[in-house]
Amino acid sequence: MIDYRIIQKENYTGKIGELVSMLEHTRAITLSEIEGLKQVDLDYLQDGSANSIGALLLHIGAIEFVHQIISFEKRDLTLREYEKWRTALELGDQAREVINKNTLEFYLDILFQVRENTLTVLKSKSDDWLYEENKWDNGVPYNNYYLWFHVIEDEINHRGQIRSIKRLINNNE
């Protein structure tokens, strides 16, 4: 059952708990949206420039992983990490070529593993951590709260794409 309340979560500080509540709500809606999809649905491409549902799911996991590294470890991806996640982060032609033929469980496992790490580390963070500031290489400031807000907004954005792809699939059946 999906919880439609933003609440403080047990084992987290107040604001972190509310953030976790939003992360969990966002994911619950995404999971309900993809429930029961078959491999053919996950691989469907509307045209030569489209993303598949599978690629979008892997992208959602990749974005969360990157934000873990930036906010939890205060660093950029290593070359090995970048090589592992590059296709899912960038999408495009390479993703259309290699992100396919996976089951829904494959994508769910990745989303679960990445999220499990997020929730574990967030238990060790205080509300003050959310407001810790840093600067991008171009000098633009950001804080950890923004980074995790972006994880949520990115997932919501791609969930909208997933809904559109599902409508196309249903119209083509």
Image (cartoon, rainbow, N blue to C red):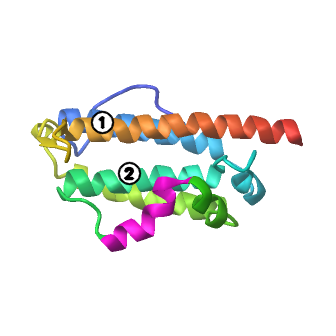
| 96 up-or-down from 5: above or below | below
Write the residue at 19% across / 59% down. 73
Q: Is residue 109 left or right of residue 71?
A: right
Q: Residue at x 62, y 55 (%)?
A: 54
In reply to whether residue 164 is colored magenta, the answer given is: no
Question: Residue sitting at 89 percent across and 43 percent down?
Answer: 173
Pointer 1 residue: 19
In the image as oriented, which residue stretches furthest toward the bottom? 80
Residue 111 bears which disc, if any? none
Callout 1: 10 Å neighbours few (<14), some, many (20+)? many
Q: State which mark lies toward you, 1 or 2.
A: 2
Which quadrant does the N terminus fall into?
top right
Does residue 43 show up?
yes
Q: Residue 52: where, in percent of width, then height?
A: 66, 51
Which amino acid does the dot numbered 2 rest on?
A: Glu
The rendered magenta stretch, by its main secondary structure, is classed as helix
Q: Secondary structure at mark 1?
A: helix
Asked if residue 163 lies left or right of residue 125, the reply is: right
User: Residue 84 colored magenta?
Assistant: yes
Q: CA distance from mark 1 to mark 2?
A: 14 Å
Q: Residue furthest front?
A: 138
Residue 129 image-quadrant placement:
top left
Image x and y of residue 152, in percent: 40, 37
Compared with 38, 29 (above or below) is above
Instruction: Please tell me which of labels 1 and 2 falls first in the chain.
Output: 1
Q: What amino acid is found at the position of numbered circle 1 in the picture?
A: Leu
Residue found at x 77% / y 57%: 40
Residue interval drawn in magenta: 79-91
> Which residue matches tag 2?
64
